[in-house]
Image (cartoon, rainbow, N blue to C red):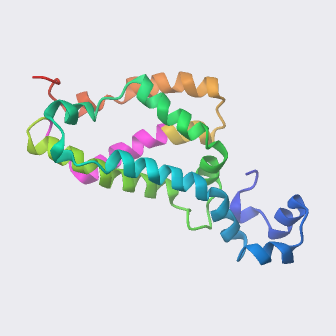
Amino acid sequence: MANGFERTSLKAICDGAGITTGALYKRYKGKEDLFCVVVANTVADLNAVAKQRGGRDASALSDDELIREWYMDEEDMMWWFRFLYERHDGFTLLLKCAEGTAYANFQHDWVEMLTEATSVFLKEAQKRNLCRSDISQQELHILLSAFWATIYEPFIHDFSWEQIEAHCRIVCNLFNWQKAFAFCEPGS
């Protein structure tokens, strides 16, 4: 966590764990394999949430449900921050320390995966004329990148939980997806 993947030697890892490099190689192929094992639960949890939230059939949602998909309040945002804070070390390793591993592009790859999942809901809303039709998948990716940067940064800068709670309120005011995409009011 202190030096990142690239600047941490295998010897330093083994010394810190009180084992020999030979003992490490008995369980792991090398330093990157060890890194991937350390973040595996966090990655699995993130992927499960993305699949659960994005795996629904957008065409089966009512207009109101589809519009509400874009509603973000403090409770929804706090859920994300709490979820990530419970996985603080793994998430922070992915954000700050993954250079040189298969997760070097984690921030971009995560947003790309969410863009793919979210675009289905946007396209359905556009098809039903519930929002602006000029938001492309590329534009959605850019907007989601900006949104997720506001989530990544408190972890990158080691915010306390109290700081994250205050930050959450600011993020909710900054990102109003319904207004940005000119969604109709639910029930209208």
> Residue 110's x, y, as percent?
44, 54
Residue drawn at (8%, 38%), measured in percent from left and top? 129
Residue drawn at (44%, 28%), measured in percent from left and top? 171
Instruction: Decide whether residue 145 is among the magenta residues.
Output: yes
Magenta residue span: 131-150
Q: Nearer the viewer, residue 2 or 30?
A: 30
Tell me if I can see residue 134 in this picture: no
> Residue 89's x, y, as percent?
67, 46
> Residue 95's x, y, as percent?
58, 51
Q: In which quarter of the image is residue 144?
A: top left
Residue drawn at (38%, 48%), measured in percent from left and top? 52
> Residue 73's x, y, as percent?
38, 24
Q: In which quarter of the image is residue 160?
A: top right
Q: Which of 93 and 80 is in front in this view?
A: 80
Q: Nearer the viewer, residue 166 or 79?
A: 79
Please, is residue 148 above or below residue 51 in the view? above
How many numbered badges does the structure rendering display? 0
Q: Quadrant of the C terminus?
A: top left
Q: Main secondary structure of the magenta part?
A: helix
Please, is residue 62 above or below residue 48 in the view? above
Tell me if I can see residue 46 in this picture: yes
